[in-house]
Amino acid sequence: MIQSFLDTVHHCVQQYSYLKKPGGIYCKRQSLGTRIPITGLLVVVILLSNNVLASDLSRYDAIQALSYNGQATYSLLLSEDVAAFDQSPVEDPTAAEGSLPQEKDATEGLFTLDFPKLLLRDTWYVLSSPVRWDANDWLKVGIGIAGVAAVTLADKPVRTQVQHIQNGSANDVASQIRQFGGSYSFATLGLFYVGGEIFHDPPAKAVFIDGAAATLVASGIITPALKYMVGRARPNADQGTHYFTPFSNSNASFPSGETTQAFAVASVIAAHYDSLWVKASSYGIASLVGMARMYEDAHWTSDALAGALIGAAVGTAIVHFNEKRRKADKETGIFITPLLAPGTGGIAITLVR
């Protein structure tokens, strides 16, 4: 039905103008000077009914060539608020016929307003998540809390064993590994962004964008807030495993900040790449960060576990949330294009999915 309508419109635009009489619509031959205004009027009418066309065409992939009988054609491509003037090459009309609009990169730009908007949106999404949790989500949270509580029983024995293996070389290694929960993690995200720009790799750039958001929410908001509210003494304070001064800055052992950061970045990388070795490497290094902090006697085992759960949960949630939005940005779009060439004219409707 739509194709028949387009054929009729093209025929009338090419040779005639519309003339409404009782019993139907007829055509009256007009000159080329009147075809162009008629074409423009048709485009305006179709644009106003764009939503109807979208619903009708959403089941099909339709491509109309931006050339006609080997002639150069000029098209005004309208998509949202973007207008671009394009000329199809005369020399190779078949190339235009087989070409599709390039898929746009839906990853937010670092130096645009999209980036701070994303940070605010992701922050609100994560912090307001509890109001959207269902019974299954609350069950997962409960299991996590119960797991951390159970591990507290092993805090003192594990610390005792770790202190027995202290040596100078291991201290140096632990000092370097813990940086993956600090400066090294930021450098890693930066390298992903640079690599994404150089090699035009949207997933790599998305790692930086999502990693920055996960860092802000997990390491910048949630973990510091818990540290202040819980106020647990560090192992090296020799106050025992159950010494707490809530709402105090003097004790900030629970949860581990470096471990939170390491797992936030690791979960973002792992979520963007399906390769098993990427996932294993990311989470493996993050786990070493938690172990390094325990080795340095800065955190209990349960502190590291809590930080790992927070970082991984926030990072994974942010990636899934942002990827849904990016996918939606690249969903079906309709391009309505007037076609003008010597001796002819018409319109093209292109559905991109």
Image: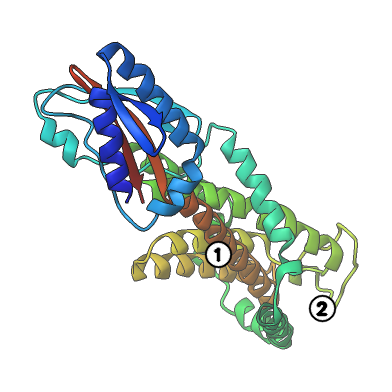
Residue 176 showing in the rendered view: no
Structural crowding at the residue carrying mark 1, measured as other residues with C-alpha within 10 Å and reported as few (<14), some (14–19) or many (≥20) = many
Q: Earlier in the sequence, mark 1 or mark 2?
A: 2
Residue 41 left/right relative to 344 = right
- Which amino acid type is marked by label 2? Gly
For the question of whether residue 49 can be seen, the reply is: yes
Residue 139 place in picture, x, y as percent: 69, 83
2 with respect to 217 (left or right): left
Q: Is residue 343 left or right of residue 225?
A: left
Please name the residue shown 55% across and 64% down the image. Answer: 316
Q: How many marks?
A: 2
Mark 1 vs mark 2: in front: 1
Kindly state the secondary structure of the residue where label 1 is placed: helix
Q: Position of residue 17 (x, y in %)?
A: 32, 24
Instruction: Name above or below for residue 207 compared with residue 29.
Output: below
**Which residue does the numbered mark 1 point to in the structure image?**
316
- In the figure, residue 262 lies in which quadrant? bottom right
Q: CA distance from mark 1 to mark 2?
A: 34 Å
* Residue 240 badge: 2
Residue drawn at the location 58% of the way across and 72% of the way down: 166
Going by the numbered disc 1, the residue's amino acid type is Thr
In this view, the residue in front, 86 or 267, is: 86
Badge 2 element: loop
Name the spot of residue 28 as percent of width and height, x first: 29, 23
